Image (cartoon, helix red, strand yellow):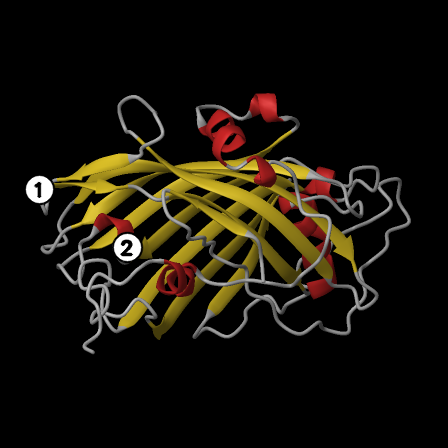
């Protein structure tokens, strides 16, 4: 089981990357000075580029990355987005290439919610829709995933991935959705639960330079990732099954060192989650989704009948 930690209560979470079976295709090797020409219809080349964009091809080399975005409320009429707070992430990861061409990726990360005006990490937040100050759950977690080559367009019911090139620009688009039975059940958590079912859409666009991706001397490249998350209320907001949802738009990038990460999250993570300030070194393969963790670790709001 993955190691996890929370403030103020024990709970962890992270959205995970999907992976599909490897395709028996080999990367294209060029005879020119660059050493490699990438074919973005080739699943092996796509994986090679993806690891350089999001991490590092060098086995065990740590990558630091950070994300910040505004979380909005989509109210009942759906006509306008209401900004509520920032979400920020600090992550440390490393990968190891496997004999079958896949990569084992291991990450430690911290997620915090921040005040829109001051940028301060929130411990509580006034929810205007229920007219109540609620306790904010800032948390840290470990995520281990196996990343495999995948076809350019996969199972449209769960995940769609496309690659686009334009001159020296390379863009990877992903669009995924989650539909599942919600372990945070309304009978036990009437204010935290969003209902019997859980629905979420998540999109991301990663942009990098082709000449850097094809440069064999670079094991990692700088890339800008923009994302969108359309999902239910966060459990700690105590919105229950009230009408509405959340929408987050964010941007993330790598950092050469921790000093390049802006804002309060590095200091907050160092103080509250020091064990998560470096990438894991031991593979466990563990992942538990945030809703399952909440149901496991948070006491029920309503005690079951005797």
Question: Dividing the image into 4 quarters, which one contains the C terminus?
Answer: bottom left
In front of the other: 126 or 44: 126
Q: How many marks?
A: 2
Q: Which element type, helix, strand or loop, lies under badge 1?
A: loop
- Whether residue 86 is situated above or below residue 55 in the rendered picture: above
Q: CA distance from mark 1 to mark 2?
A: 16 Å
- Give the labeled residue for mark 2: 235
Q: Which residue is found at the position 43% from the left and 44% from the top?
A: 139
- Whether residue 192 is situated above or below residue 255 in the rendered picture: below
Quarter location, residue 260: top right
Point out the residue furthest to the right here: 31
Point out the residue furthest to the bottom here: 306
Q: Which residue is found at the position 64% from the left and 67% from the top?
A: 150
Which x, y percent locates residue 57?
76, 47
Which x, y percent locates residue 251?
45, 38
Which x, y percent locates residue 24?
77, 74
Quarter location, residue 163: bottom right
In front of the other: 30 or 9: 9
Quarter location, residue 223: top right
Residue 42 visible (yes or no): no
Which x, y percent locates residue 182?
32, 70
- Give the labeled residue for mark 1: 131
Q: Which element type, helix, strand or loop, lies under badge 2?
A: helix
Within 10 Å of the Cα at label 2, are there few (<14), some (14-19), or many (20+) other Cα atoms? some
Question: Dividing the image into 4 quarters, which one contains the N terminus?
Answer: bottom right
User: Which of marks 2 and 1 precedes in the sequence?
Assistant: 1
Residue 183 visible (yes or no): yes
Q: Which residue is found at the position 17% from the left and 54% from the top?
A: 239
């Amino acid at each position: 089981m993955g190691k996890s930690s929370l403030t103020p209560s024990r709970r962890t979470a992270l959205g995970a990357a999907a992976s599909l079976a490897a395709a028996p295709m080999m990367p294209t090797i060029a005879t020119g000075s660059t050493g490699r020409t990438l074919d973005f219809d080739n699943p092996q080349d796509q994986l090679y580029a993806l690891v350089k964009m999001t991490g590092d091809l060098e086995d065990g080399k740590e990558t630091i990355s950070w994300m910040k975005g505004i979380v909005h409320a989509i109210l009942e009429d759906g006509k306008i987005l209401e900004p509520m707070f920032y979400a920020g992430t600090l992550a440390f990861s490393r990968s190891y290439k496997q004999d079958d061409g896949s990569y084992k990726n291991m990450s430690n990360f911290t997620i915090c919610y921040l005040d829109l005006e001051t940028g301060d990490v929130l411990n509580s937040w006034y929810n205007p829709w229920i007219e109540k100050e609620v306790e904010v759950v800032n948390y840290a977690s470990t995520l281990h995933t196996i990343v495999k080559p995948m076809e350019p367009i996969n199972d449209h019911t769960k995940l769609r991935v496309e690659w686009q090139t334009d001159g020296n620009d390379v863009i990877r688009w992903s669009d995924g959705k989650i539909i599942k039975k919600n372990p945070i059940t309304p009978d036990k958590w009437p204010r935290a639960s969003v209902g019997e079912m859980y629905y979420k859409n998540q999109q991301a666009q990663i942009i990098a330079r082709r000449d850097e991706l094809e440069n064999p001397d670079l094991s990692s490249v700088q890339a800008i990732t923009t994302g969108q998350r359309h999902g239910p209320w966060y459990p700690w907001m105590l919105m229950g099954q009230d009408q509405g949802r959340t929408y987050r738009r964010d941007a993330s990038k790598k950092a050469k060192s921790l000093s390049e990460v802006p804002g309060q999250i590095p200091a907050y993570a160092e103080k509250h989650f020091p064990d998560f300030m470096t990438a894991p070194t031991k593979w466990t393969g563990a992942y538990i989704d945030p809703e399952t963790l909440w149901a496991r670790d948070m006491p029920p709001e309503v005690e079951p009948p005797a």
